[in-house]
């Protein structure tokens, strides 16, 4: 693992360094191990510290390294596969839902959500806040927007806000006939409140999954779920019945 | 749009600024329009340039802004919805495939791919390189790894490499019985060759979609597809038959 490999490549220097470090992580380090400091690493690979830092940033983006204040840079465990397929065909909160209902409130949704729900300007919706916590570590935070017209029988007797209200909204929503859902994933940056719940800094890259629940030919609810991009791989597909070992599933896929 | 909104929020200053600019983009700017320079923008919003720059970086991450050398910062069009669902249930290259076959070669795949294909150390696979070009602008670059064992009848008469070889590999792969496919999406950074084809800088954030094609109870091929994260939303779900207007589909979803 000398410096000679770095000399004849057309790629940016830090990029090839990234590959070299990545291979070293596989062979010389174990998950959770703390990396040597930047000065020692730069000397080991024969590069400037600025180059090293770029390579480490890339490896963090790819989920290979974690940088934690007070700890240093550690080797990250493989990303966790989190199922986001729509094969369950169920309303949020139904049956074997992977989400915990945290809170409920009423507010004007963001403009993009208002457009998807075809709301009037300034029209409020119910907002259910949920967390997805597979192994005692939250991996995703969700805001579910439900217009009043989707839950017409919601009783005024129910709590006006809070978890009880959230559960009442989900219960009423579940009475509708779910015709289908479409889903999209895109890159985003963590909002401050999501970041806090996900133990990330505001603005950290996240994967935002938008789900549109359709009933009666119209969009009855919209979910915006923010997944940690550093620790999650989002899985979907038609392979619910495929024989693929847990071991393989846990492996890093890129 | 004064500065008063920035004063009483618990979020980082640049974060709230981001929201304010985002609203200004909606109301005061049109797609493709060039933003004022940083000094003027900082003055307009009453913030330091460092704060402004952080907010602009976030908006670029979220696909609202594009920064291009020699042009400046422009308002990005809404992200394009790109279907990555597995509902087609077909081998790569079959029927209405959205991909263009570009090249074919043989090489040792990355360690993660070798593990998924259960290869011996140093074992080579066929590699088919494809591009996804929906509107004359490439949005994704793919490397499809096909072990020799998946295409046993591949004729030695076929070209040893290049597009003709790639097509021969796809043709032979298509003879297998496709049992299923699973798919995962995660955050990655653009490799130099992908970056070039996608008109991005190496290391730019990308969405990496890994597909495992299963035949005969084993993984017969693995695809690593790198999508531009700035311009793409990846769509999937069970809504192929839902009545949702094109207009809505094109809207930004977060």
Image: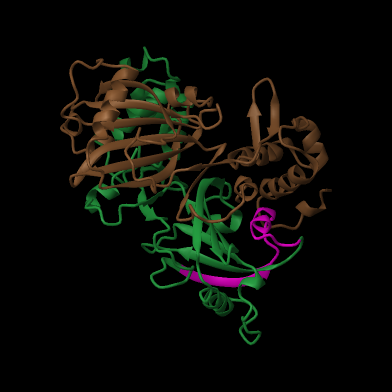
Chain colours: A green, B brown
A2 and A139: which one is in front? A139
Q: Position of residue A15 (x, y in %)?
A: 42, 25
Q: Position of residue B60 (x, y in %)?
A: 62, 37
Q: Is residue A12 above or below residue B246?
A: above
A114 in magenta: yes
Q: Is residue A83 above or below residue B132?
A: below
Q: Is residue A28 visible?
A: no
State the extent of the magenta-drawn residues as a range.
Answer: A100-120
Q: Position of residue A218 (x, y in %)?
A: 60, 62
Give left or right: position of B162 versus B253: left
- Name the outermost residue toward the top: A8
Give left or right: position of B102 versus B80: left
Number of disc labels: 0
Q: Is residue A68 above or below residue A134?
A: above
Q: Residue at x 56, y 50 (%)?
A: A190
A86 and A156: which one is in front? A86
Give left or right: position of B47 versus B210: right
- Quadrant showing the N terminus of chain A: top left
Q: Is residue B103 above or below residue A187?
A: above
Q: Is residue A217 visible?
A: yes
- Name the outermost residue toward the bottom: A157
Q: Position of residue A125 (x, y in %)?
A: 66, 68
Query: Which quarter of the figure has residue B211?
Result: top left
Query: Which quarter of the figure has residue B147?
Result: top left
Q: Residue at x 77, y 45 (%)?
A: B24
A88 and A81: which one is in front? A88
- Quadrant showing the C terminus of chain A: top left
B46 in magenta: no
Give left or right: position of A37 versus A214: left
Q: Residue at x 79, y 54 (%)?
A: B5
């Amino acid at each position: 693992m000398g410096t000679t490999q770095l000399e004849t490549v057309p790629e940016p220097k830090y990029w090839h360094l990234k590959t070299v470090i990545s291979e070293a992580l596989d062979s010389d380090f174990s998950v959770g191990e703390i990396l040597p400091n930047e000065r020692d690493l730069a000397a080991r690979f024969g590069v400037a510290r600025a180059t090293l830092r770029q390579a480490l940033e890339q490896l963090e983006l790819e989920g290979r390294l974690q940088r934690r204040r007070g700890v240093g840079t550690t080797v990250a465990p493989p990303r966790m596969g989190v199922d986001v397929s729509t094969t369950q065909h169920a309303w949020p909160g139904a049956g074997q839902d992977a989400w915990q209902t945290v809170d409920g409130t009423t507010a004007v949704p963001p403009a993009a959500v208002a457009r998807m729900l075809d709301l009037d300007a300034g029209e409020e919706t119910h907002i259910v806040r949920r967390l997805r916590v597979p192994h005692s570590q939250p991996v995703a935070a969700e805001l579910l927007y439900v217009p009043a017209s989707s839950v017409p029988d919601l009783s005024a007797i129910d709590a006006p806000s809070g978890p009880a209200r959230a559960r009442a909204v989900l219960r009423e929503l579940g009475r509708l006939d779910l015709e289908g859902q479409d889903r999209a994933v895109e890159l985003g940056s963590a909002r401050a409140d999501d970041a806090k719940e996900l133990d990330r800094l505001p603005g950290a890259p996240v994967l935002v999954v938008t789900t549109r629940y359709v009933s009666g030919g119209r969009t009855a609810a919209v979910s915006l779920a923010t997944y940690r991009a550093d620790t999650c791989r989002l899985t979907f597909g038609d392979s619910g019945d495929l024989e693929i070992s847990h071991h393989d599933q846990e492996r890093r896929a890129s």
